[in-house]
Amino acid sequence: MTKESPETLLKSKFGFDAFRPGQQETIEILLAGRSAAAIFPTGSGKSLCYQLTALLLPGLTLVVSPLLALMKDQIDSLQAKNIKAERLDSSLTEEKYREVSNAIRRGELKMLFVSPERLTNERFLNLIRGLQISLLAVDEAHCISAWGHNFRPDYLKLAQAVKSLKVERVLALTATATPKVSDDMAEAFNIGNGDVVNTGFYRPNLEFRVTGCTGTDREQLLIKRLNERPAGAAIVYVHLQKDAEHVARRLCENGFHAAAYHAGLKNEVRAAVQEAFMEGRIPIICATIAFGMGVDKADIRYVYHYHMAKGFESYLQETGRAGRDGDPAICELFACADDGTTLENFVYGDTPAASSIECLVNDLLDAGEEIDVTARELARDHDIRQLVVSTLLTHLELFGIIEFDGYYYSDIRFEAHKSGAEILAQYDEKQRTFLRQIFACGRKARKWVTLNVEQAEERTGHTRAVILRAMESLQEKQLITLQMSGYRQRFKRVQQEVDRSAICERLVDLFNEHEGQEIDRIQGMIRYAEEADCLTNRLLTYFGEPIESCGHCGTCMGDKPINLPKRKVIAVDAEVFNQMNELALRYPKALGEPKQQARFLCGLNSPAVSAERALRGTPLFNSCSHVPFSAVLTAVE
């Protein structure tokens, strides 16, 4: 903890002469001991609000972020300023995990970055319980709202973690919050009305433009735009990984220096591409929407949406990566109505079949009082995407039917670095008896001892948490190496008498409602593309911040409104369905339901299809990606 003022620290540690709008107000709320929300446009300095505050508070600041790349970039930047910050995530080696854990125990860290899932992790909770957590900063906090565009069930558990860990104050951060989402954030984290700092979404240096096109002519349109405009750093957003590769290749063939960026690349390749873009060695990145989250490059002059964005929230976030230095930047949308088919297919493909929901609910409720599951197993067994399974479990919690009882590791083993007698000799008689009882519950192989924790609980009379803390202590003293695996979830059955059909019907309605919201978002982008009035105002009105005509978007500067051509209506060859029937007979678990078949034909992967590797290599997979999902489903049925 430093005695410097926020203003002095801003200059001495971060090198800035003045706060940006909203930063000082947010920091003062936190220093006064209250929770706050910071709703700032992308690139407006949200992270400084918790970074600087952390240095003015005692104890630890936890930063929750769903973005691993953001964690790495921020930690590198903080460590370069001699600020003690680390992260705990699944990519760390066991040695690095121990190193960070020991630093936490010794109180050496000011900031620790974790994913939202980590705050329900048994090992992590044992590590930080009892520590002074002065601040919990929640990045992408809109994810807590089911009304938001990126609802994540684990975010709902953050509010519970705040109470159980006795967090002193919370900072909720987002760049995309409608008034309803803002209210949800404030309610979840007990943030007062006057402590929501919203600096507005208007960026006067951004020039929004829309150009209508067909799927075949946008490639030449992009090349034309890059040729006719002054050179500058650019991001070209596409829907699919293969599109990123194709567009980057075509730009290189036409004399531009471009590279693809997407989740399918190896980590080292992605990191190299990002670094080259940051340093200006590669001026054009062709990327799926994951690129740019947390990337602090101020001089991006152009953001091109080669394909339509999936909604206003996504569009605002992606275009917000342009012009962070305050200089003019152009954000151009290549509008093609056929893109709506691809985007809608992804949405329809996420919605689980009613029969899958019914089977999953029955399996859970037939499991007894204690429910022990993994989202991965449920996803595989019922052919529902893992994130959708987590959402379904969360809804059952909110209905009061089950209660989350924590994550735990089913497999715990250790390697002893000394003999049992040598280890026990370092403890007093009471501790020796306790450890001896734990060791007696281990099954020894050549190198590793597998611990039966349930047996150890029964033998010692202590809880699982106490036993694991003892094992962590042994590792801290370098007496053993501890390994944990088999990450599982536990739930308790709360309601005994349940109308299962009513519950399933309610869940089906919820998923259909969410599906409708997402389709409305896509339709909203198509209407935006055909907007006759100010584009900036249309975008800001969605976020509850209407303005007069901006004077610097395409329509304000005289561009004529676009009438997008209707989507193509493409009939599917009947032979496709004959082949589909034959394939379904061979793979009934993956393709037995009409919805499964429609997903498969539209190129939408699922857990059951992934389990049958041979399936994705068949020509039928993705053969109807250009056809609306609803039309394919109707034809299949």
Image (cartoon, rainbow, N blue to C red):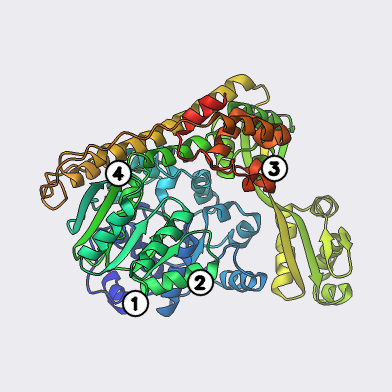
Mark 1, secondary structure of its residue:
helix
| Amino acid type of the residue tagged 1 in the rendering | Lys
Which x, y percent locates residue 493?
67, 33
Neighbor class of circle 4 (other Cα within 10 Å; few <14, some 14-19, many 20+) is: few
Q: Which of pointers 4 and 1 lies earlier in the amino acid sequence?
A: 1
Asked whether disc 4 touches disc 1, contact meaning CB atoms under 8 Å apart, the reply is no
Asked whether disc 1 touches disc 3, contact meaning CB atoms under 8 Å apart, the reply is no
| Amino acid type of the residue tagged 4 in the rendering | Asn
Which x, y percent locates residue 215?
35, 46
Q: Check residue 13 in the rendering and tell me which mark sits there, or answer none.
A: 1
**Residue 32 picture quarter:** bottom left
Neighbor class of circle 3 (other Cα within 10 Å; few <14, some 14-19, many 20+) is: some
- State the separation of the CA atoms marked 4 and 2: 32 Å
Disc 3 marks which residue?
Answer: 373
Disc 2 marks which residue?
Answer: 109
Which x, y percent locates residue 407?
65, 49
The nearer-to-camera label among 4 and 1 is 1
Asked whether disc 4 touches disc 2, contact meaning CB atoms under 8 Å apart, the reply is no
